[in-house]
Image (cartoon, rainbow, N blue to C red):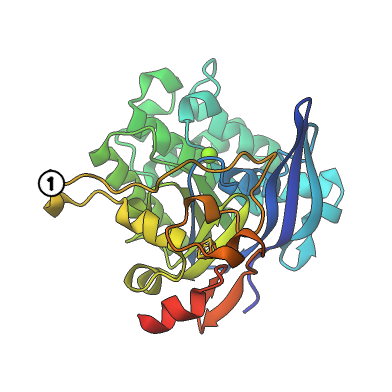
Amino acid sequence: SRPLLEVENLFVEFHTREGVAKVINGVTYDVRAGETLAVLGESGSGKSVTAQTIMGILDMPPGRVAGGSIRFHGRDMLAMSAEERRKIRGEGIAMVFQDALSALNPTFTVGFQIAEQYRIRRGLSRGEAKRRAIEILDQVKIPNAKQRVTEYPHQFSGGMRQRVMIAMSLALDPEVLIADEPTTALDVTVQAQIMDLLAELQRDRQMGMILITHDLGVVADVADRIAVMYAGRIVEQANVHELYANPGHPYTIGLINSIPRIDEKGQELRTIKGLPPNLMRIPSGCPFHPRCPRAEQVCTQQLPPLLQVGPTRASACHFAEEMVSRG
Ligand code: SF4
Ligand code: MG
């Protein structure tokens, strides 16, 4: 089947007084119904900006889409009218933000905020909309949904508030759910609960899910495929097991090595040396070369394209074939 959502060769720039930041530099990925794609990268890698561009909340100054397409059911959203795009938002593609507290309106009850969507977008009556709001709060496993529907965002714990945020995003039955660091602000135990909930909802509803995270440890059990981003590009894409067992890009190896392991307590965390590049001055050749332990001369001069190096895997490293075949 055709993917629900296809991002192809997307370029996004930020025009600022200091210069042009090239934040997305040719990103291509897709997601199908019933599948979870994790998009992984450090902050500034472009993973959130790609999502915001899909949602149509970035295509305004200083942000500018400089090329590429975003197709939903085969139709390019970047070529649609604002009205058509608005209709897709919420019903076709919805987003869960990292910080529920700032994404929710503090002055309205959570029930009102959810019910508004049913009233405005579905034309439901006040009573029916409230009933549906309770139903969806129930589906995200908020205890006593019937009482809690009349409470304000600040009356919920961090984890419960994130459930409210998820309920909001699911209200109009989206086909694709984008979750941007949905658990980053939460305690570790609550993180696991929210991740389990998202996985369950994705399965039950057969949604396509894009899970954005900087934490490879969080997505291992949930994702089908992983796209690793660096400096606004995808540097490796593979199914989860392949990526873990046999990473095909030095940056992926660095990310895997920096996952804290409980059985290695006391051992120093091996992080990737150096910092992500300044997007106004992306290094020549392979943008990862200043940090790459495997870099050679060619890496400073030639940009490695993202090439297929296995049935389900692509990598953007001059030595990808070698790395993958060595296992
Ligand atoms: Fe490292 Fe070179 Fe591969 Fe880039 S192309 S990841 S610098 S080995
Ligand atoms: Mg982000």
Q: Is residue 200 visible?
A: no
Q: Place residue 142 in its image quadrant.
A: top left
Quadrant in which the N terminus appears = bottom right
Asked whether, in this view, residue 137 is left or right of residue 305, the answer is left
Which of 265 and 171 lies nearest the eye of the viewer? 265
Residue at the spot 45% in from the left edge and 48% down from the top edge: 213
Residue flagged by tag 1: what amino acid is it? Lys
Residue 185 seen in the figure = yes
Asked which secondary structure carries label 1, the reply is loop
Is disc 1 surrounded by few (<14), some (14 to 19) or many (20+) residues within 10 Å?
few
| Residue at (62, 48) in percent of width and height | 51
Whole-percent x, y for residue 211 in the image: 48, 53
Image: 3 above or below 300: below
Residue topped by disc 1: 265
> Does the numbered disc 1 mark a residue whose Cβ is under 8 Å from ligand 2?
no
Above/below status of 26 relative to 125 = below
From what the image shows, is residue 169 above or below residue 79? Answer: above
Q: Nearer the viewer, residue 12 or 121?
A: 12
Residue 303: where, in percent of width, then height? 66, 63
Q: Residue at x 74, y 47 (%)?
A: 12
Task: Please identify the quarter of the rendering in which residue 151 is found.
Answer: top left
> How many marks can you see?
1
The image shows residue 290 at horizontal and vertical percentages of 52, 50
* Residue in front for this viewpoint, 104 or 315: 315
Residue 9 in percent (x, y) is at 73, 62
Residue in view at x 70 percent, y 54 percent: 25
